[in-house]
Image: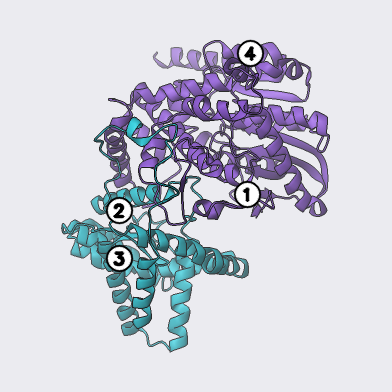
Amino acid sequence: MKSYPRLLFWLFGVLIFTNAPAYDYPIEDPFVATVVGTPKDLRAELPEEIPLRKRSIKIFKDRVTPDFLFYDDKLRYSYALQKVPAPLVFLIAGTGGSYDGEKNTMMGRAFYQAGFHVISLSSPTHMNFVIAGSSTSVPGHAYRDAEDLYRVMERIWGTLEGRAEVTDFYVTGYSLGGFNTAFVTRLDEERQVFNFRKALLINPPVSLYNSISLLDRMLENIPGGVDNFYLFYNRLVKAFSEVYKREDTVKLSEDFLYKVYDALQPKEEELAALIGTSFRITSANMSFTSDVMTDYGYIKPKNVQFTKNTSPGVFNAVAHRLGFTDYFHAYFFPYYRAEDPSMSRDDMVARMSLTGIQDYLRSAGKIEVMHNQDDLILEPGEIDFFPRVFGDRAKIYPRGGHCGNMEFRDNVAHMISVFQE
Amino acid sequence: MAALLLAAALFLTGCSMAPIQVGDTVDEPVFAADRILPDEFTRADTTSDPWEGFNRTMYRFNYRFDKYVFLPLVSGYQAVMPDFAEQGVHNFFTNFRQITTLMNSILQFNGAKSLETASRLLVNSTIGVLGLFDWATPMGIPYHQEDFGQTLGVWGVGSGPYLVLPILGPSSVRDGIGLGVDAFVRTEIRDAIVDLETWQKVTWGVLDAIDTRANVSFRYYETGSPFEYEWVRMLSNTKRQLDIEK
């Protein structure tokens, strides 16, 4: 009888799965996971809308925003308040991420549904923050960015204080936002404005320099190098169009990227190139904006002024050929070394890392980590930093790439539970 | 008409796109273009933009129009109207626009799209009570969007230079003309079917505009890139090409 072994197998399977809660995020390949994220039917069930308000605030009253960037003179953010006393969570976006990007929006909905007030912030590497929220406009400095974020949090909280009762403050962020969260929490120990009850780092880098080097190198996967980007772009468009043309409606469905992936079946190198491209675009946006703000002469000559109508022209092409490591060596490091001439390049690299504050992190019971064993932004072995320093305050999932599983129901449930303990 | 020409002249004159150089020589930046860029390289963005100065100015105008007029109107509308009423208005105008989609599907000799669009129109205009209710979608009838610009594209007309239209945003010469044709046809058909007073025509137009804007999520200058103008130009051009092929 054919059905007997099947029944046995099924029974066996049931026994296994009821005894060992399996993590069933389905995507094994970290590159696929990073690009495609979580399939729609496996995402956490979240409300479609929350009472979200989008606002902007002028942080530096005396700052004169360059004409060319006139539209970003105020820092944009969003918030959603509960009608009853509730805990409040600050959300910090990842590299180049916006307060209203997909991940912050998802986290906002999840926390609001769980009964939190929510304030959502862009990354200090986002153009809007570089112009309107950063004191130096040279982002990426772990300590400076933390101070900038703290100032922004204080100012925004100041506008909302009268309208909401807060029981406790929490803070979280993903990717670079998770890195920021660690330094913001440490700063809070001194400043004591919020006294965060808990902080959650989601997929943070250990060493900023190591991670940016890794991400810069991913771009080398473009066949023929960056000068052949137009060929790569055309191939991407072709792939998108195959699926787009087949779609019933004109709108892009939530599963669009997955359908494209399914249709194209790209190789790992192609996915790496895609990820590298995304970070390269962020690098160009960030460093060019910073250069215009400070007149440093990184890409744009110092004695060249932009008007409202100026076309960046050739600077656009140059900016996209420079990575985060170029920014670090030729702009970031010289800029901050001017303040402290004794600092060497290696010192700077070491300072911009969680390793530099590991004693604090080890002792800070309020800080927890959510990460993936196969996260792409970590060098081999770096993932072990987290269980070593955080012990069982670090939850390491077996797969998910870099933030690919952030919307997976298990992960969202864990995120909330960390702040509800 | 004279006012329009004057406005156009003003736009064109105030349009220098060159950066201002202080002094005689260029202060070499760390990464100078002639060091970094190869002598010849192919750009991914192949959109022709000979009127870039005008387009940039119009892009900024649209941003301000959105910020001070259009989006506040949309917010007010959304605050005042109950959800079901908003949906009804949206269904109504979406259905009405299917008239030109049908016309364009026929002009493109696309039998399937013509039939499907005609079915949608029929279903939603009858049991959907003049388009207020969308029964066609739950019935599984595919939804298409075809405008005259796409029809011209299918016929082989090139897009012409990039053109940022006032209020309507990124487009091209061909597609701008296409939008005009569609709007004209819809207005003519509307006036043939029903006799409206002037104030009713104005209300129709305003509601149509607000409903359209409410359903387009794009916000000027929120892409997070100082190169937004170039990105929007490239991506809107790519999307148009795909829509024509679709």
Dividing the picture into quadrants, the one containing residue A332 is top right
Give left or right: position of A167 versus A12: right
- Among the two numbered marks 4 and 1 on one chain, the one whose residue lies closer to the N terminus: 1
Q: CA distance from mark 4 to mark 1?
A: 34 Å
The residue carrying mark 4 is A385
Q: Position of residue B148 (x, y in %)?
A: 26, 65
Q: Tell me which chain the residue with mark 1 is part of.
A: A
- Indicate the quadrant containing the N terminus of chain A: top left, top right, bottom left or bottom right: top left
Q: Tell me which chain the residue with mark 3 is part of.
A: B
The residue carrying mark 2 is B240
In the picture, the disc for residue B176 is 3
Nearer the viewer's eye, disc 4 or disc 1?
Answer: 1
Image coloring type: by chain
Q: Amino acid at mark 4?
A: Phe
Circles 2 and 3 on the same subunit: yes
Q: Quick one: which chain is purple?
A: A
Q: Position of residue A58 (x, y in %)?
A: 67, 52
Q: Quick one: which chain is cyan?
A: B
* Secondary element type, mark 3: helix
Q: Residue sitting at 16 percent across and 57 percent down?
A: B156
Q: Residue sitting at 58 percent across and 36 percent down?
A: A138
- Indicate the quadrant containing the C terminus of chain A: top left, top right, bottom left or bottom right: top right
Q: CA distance from mark 2 to mark 4?
A: 48 Å
Q: Contact, CB < 8 Å: mark 2 with mark 1?
A: no
Q: As displayed, is residue A341 above or below residue B220?
A: above
* Secondary element type, mark 2: helix
In the picture, the disc for residue A75 is 1
- Among the two numbered marks 2 and 3 on one chain, the one whose residue lies closer to the N terminus: 3
